[in-house]
Image (tube, grey):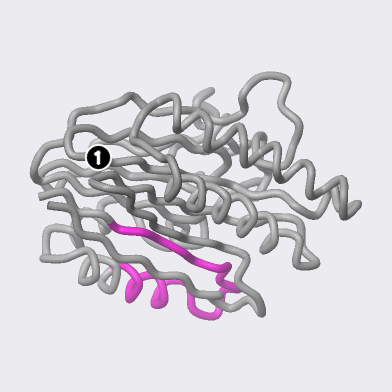
Amino acid sequence: MLTYESVSNCGERKYNEDYAGIEKRGDSFCFVLADGLGGHGGGAEASKTVAEYILRDFRKCGEASEAYLQKCFEESQSLLLKEQREQNRIYEMKTTLVVLLVDETNFQWGHIGDSRLYYFKNKKCRLRTLDHSVPQMLAAAGEIKEKQIRGHADRNRLLRVMGTEWQSPGYQLGERMRRDKGEAFLLCSDGFWEWILERNMQTALKRSKSPEEWLKRMEKEILKNGAGKGMDNYTAIAVFLD
C-alpha cells in the first residue's frame, strides 16, 4: 500500500516558484518536486517545464527503473535548455529537481540542487540527499558542521542545477532499493527544510498516522519558526509505504 500528500505555499514571497506533482502508471508512481531559480517568472516557468515534462512522459511510458530515472533528468534538461535559448532567458530559467520512482517491489530517487529527499525507516531518518551547494561542500570538507548549513550566508549558492550546461551529468542517483513496510519519504524544497530540523521531522512522523497529518505537523512548526523572517516558498511531498 502507498499513500501520499503534498503541500505548496508561497511563504512570505509574492509568487510561488516551486512545483510538486505526482503521477501513477499501473502499479508505479512518480513523485516530482522542483524549486525554480532566476527571478522575473523564469524560475516558476523552469520548475513547471521540467516537472510537467517528467510527469507527462511517466504517464505514457514511465517505469521505476534506473534507466528511466536517468531519462527524466536528461530529457527535461534538454527541454529546459531549448526553452532558454528560444526565449533568450539563459540566466532566468533554472531549477532544482528531486524525483522519486516507486513500484510494487523497488524504489529509487535522483536529485540536483538543494531540494532534498529524506528517507525514513521505522519512523527514523536513515538518510537524506546531500545538497549541491557551497555550504554542503564546506560541511563535507569539515569547515562547518551540518547543522550550520541552514543559516549559512552562502546557503543559496548552488553548484549544480537544471538549466546549467553539464560537462558530465550534474544530477545524482540514489541506490535502487527494495521496498518494505514502515518506510516513508519526504521530498521538500529548501524553504521547507530551512525551518524544521531532522529530529523534529522524525518526531512529527512518530505522531502521525498519515502523510497528510505528518505534513500538517511539520508545516505548523515551519510557520512558527519562519514567520516574519522573509520565508521562501515551501513545498513538500510526503509518501508512506505500508
Expressed as whole percent of the image width and height from the top left, the position of residue 97 reads: 54, 45
Is residue 30 found left or right of 111 in the rendered image? left
The residue under label 1 is 103
Is residue 122 found left or right of 135 in the rendered image? left
State the residue lying farthest toward the top: 168
Mark 1: few/some/many CA within 10 Å (<14, 14-19, 20+): many
Q: Secondary structure at mark 1?
A: loop
Q: Residue at x 61, y 59 (%)?
A: 48
* Residue 231 belongs to magenta span: yes
- How many circles with numbers are drawn on the protein? 1
Please tell me whether residue 141 is drawn above or below residue 165 in the rendered image. above
Is residue 13 found left or right of 239 in the rendered image? right
Residue 141 or residue 1, whichever sits in front: 1
Q: Residue at x 28, y 41 (%)?
A: 102
Is residue 156 found left or right of 5 in the rendered image? right
Residue 60 or residue 167, whichever sits in front: 60
Expressed as whole percent of the image width and height from the top left, the position of residue 161 reads: 65, 40
Part of the protein shown in magenta: 218-238
Expressed as whole percent of the image width and height from the top left, the position of residue 87 reads: 87, 55
* Residue 117 belongs to magenta span: no
Residue 3 or residue 217, whichever sits in front: 3
Expressed as whole percent of the image width and height from the top left, the position of residue 167 reads: 73, 20
Please tell me whether residue 182 is drawn above or below residue 23 in the rendered image. above
Q: Residue at x 83, y 49 (%)?
A: 91
